[in-house]
Amino acid sequence: MSLLLIVCLNKDPSLSPARISSIERQTSSPVASLDMVKAKGIPNKHLHARASFLYQAATYLSLQRTTESSLSERDDPSTAVDTRNPFNDNAVSKPALVLASHLRAVTLKGQIRLAADLKRTICKTCSAILIPGQTSTHSLENESTRGEKPWADVLKITCNACSSTKRYPIGTTKRQNKAGRRNAHRRKSNPRTPVYDEREASSDTRSRPGKVKTLSAA
């Protein structure tokens, strides 16, 4: 008796004989059982663990470096960071830069997509970990007339190591495409009206050229 069948019987002892036989057929070969186990797991789990460790280690070393630099600046003002220098060695830790660059290499080669909030904490120029108030400077900009438009707010992040600047809009939401706006208008006007899905229509057209449109219930 397979391990999967034992687990199923423990969870539901009242399984029918037909269900038991179907489970035995599915797990009769070792290849099928191995595929079922792999389907439940996370793909490239070791790469996710490695990327998480590299990010945490780079962040820790960056925090230690900023603490040491702040103490040295207080004791000796001549060691303060020169903002006119194109790259400040005192702003970030070199081991942290190495770990962050390894993190980018692992995610690119392993095709791991990082979250947007996580990507914004890594400088794209020098791979420094951007910590607000320590390794980076965050400011809010609004270039509209007298700053009267709240949707024109832009978050400006400046890296203290390489002085590179990134801007992210925060006062507006992502605009829907034409199909999304049309479907939202149809749902609002008549919830029972079928909604046309262009993605399903395109896939259906490639598989069956005779049909062009596909309707899906709202």
Image (cartoon, rainbow, N blue to C red):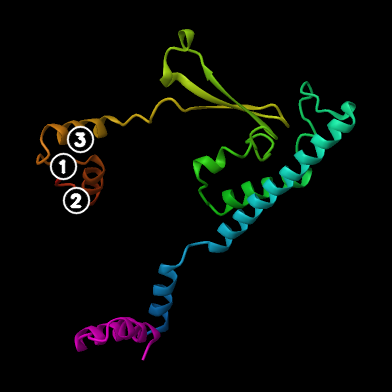
Residue at image point 58% right, 63% down:
46
Task: Find disc 1 in the rendering and name its residue.
Answer: 213
The quadrant of the picture occupied by the C terminus is top left
Per the model, the C-alpha gap separating discs 3 and 2 is 24 Å
Query: Is residue 13 located in the magenta-colored stretch of the structure?
Result: yes
For the residues labelled 1 and 3, the Cα–Cα distance comes to 15 Å
Residue on which the image places disc 2: 208
Q: Is residue 206 visible to the viewer in this orientation of the structure?
A: yes
Seen in the picture, residue 8 relative to 210 is either above or below; the reply is below
Q: Three-letter amino acid code at disc 3?
A: Asn
Residue tagged 3 = 183
* First reached walking from the N terminus: tag 1 or tag 2: 2
Amino acid type, mark 1: Lys
Q: Residues within 10 Å of mark 2 (few under 14, many from 20)?
A: few
Q: CA distance from mark 1 to mark 2?
A: 11 Å
Find numbered disc 2 in the image and state the secondary structure of the residue it sits on. loop
